[in-house]
Image (cartoon, grey):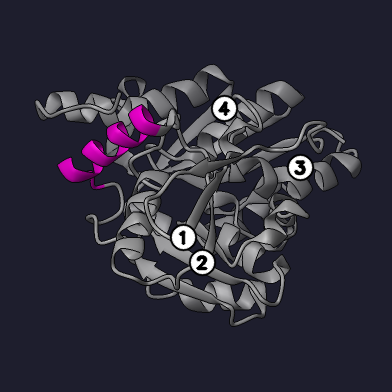
Amino acid sequence: MFLKIPSQPIPIQKIPLDKDIALFIKREDLIHPLISGNKYWKLFHNINTYIDRKPEKPFVITFGGAFSNHIAAVAALGKLAGISTLGIIRGEELISKWKENPTLSFASKNRMNLKFITREEYRNKEKLTEFLQEEFPDALIVPEGGTNADAVEGVKMMLNDETKDFDYLCTAVGTGGTLAGISRHCEDYQKVIGIKAVEDSSLENRISGLTLKKNFNLINSDLGGYGKIKDENILFINDFKEKYDIPLDPIYTGKMMQKVFQLIEEGYFPEKSRILCFHTGGLQGIEGANKLLREQKRKIII
């Protein structure tokens, strides 16, 4: 087994509020310095099962965008495990400038080969996956964001006896695998809330197919589209870090926590509620976000 269950429990940190509601955050971002947060658990069964098969020439192929946390995690894992990796990257315009991109530069330094394709080609990932599996029959092909049935089983590891003590479980949502895993494996009395980082009309059906439960609710972050960073989000992230010494990323966890605070103010949660938010990592994306913010002459994330 390459990816192992940590010997020390993941800390759950209280966020003090002046309300009759208890808010906590589970620091999955601390699980590994390079394979951070939910990516660790989404890859847990995928990689361990694949390595157990003892392929003659291990090879992992996956998909992602210019600042993908998943691409960074798979690249790091590949180097650490001695497995060749290939990242299929959305946007052929990046061919001439990927070295300026912190995430893609990191992936390349971790020996991931990068193949850039058009956005139209990328949208047809199912056909592309079939083609790649025919070309590389012994390869492990992991979907965008790492979301598949094995990922959902891996996310189960984010839940334990401590997490049973909460009424609401909250997570940011990209491809939906983390929400599906929490929904599928949480207690019957718990409600699961997913804060959407991306507008995707297929998201609810995809999650429903993976969880087989109806205990979750998807809520828009209302903080711009995917990858968009508003000044108010930067202000919230910086203030949050200063108050609680917890860094957040601007794409997922920053928007999730800002929305949870908003929901608390609006009275969404009943009094005496105990809320647990999952910090799913993604902090590697801050460097790329700050590069763009500097170019726009805006405040950066500290």
* Mark 4, residue position: 112
Marks 4 and 3, how far apart at CA: 16 Å
Dot in front, 3 or 2: 2
Residue at the limit of the structure toward the top, as seen here: 109
Which secondary structure lies at badge 4? strand
* Mark 2, residue position: 272
**Which amino acid does the dot numbered 2 rest on?**
Lys
Above-or-below relation of 148 to 99 = below
**Which amino acid does the dot numbered 1 rest on?**
Ile
Marks 2 & 1, CB-CB < 8 Å contact: yes
Question: How many neighbours does mark 3 have within 10 angstroms: few (below 14), some (14-19), or many (20 or more)?
Answer: many
Marks 3 & 1, CB-CB < 8 Å contact: no
**Which amino acid does the dot numbered 4 rest on?**
Met
| Residue 207 in picture, x, y percent from top left | 56, 72
**Which amino acid does the dot numbered 3 rest on?**
Ile
Marks 3 and 2, how far apart at CA: 41 Å
Say whether residue 55 is left or right of residue 229.
right
| Residue 47 in picture, x, y percent from top left | 76, 42
Number of marks: 4
Question: How many neighbours does mark 2 have within 10 angstroms: few (below 14), some (14-19), or many (20 or more)?
Answer: few
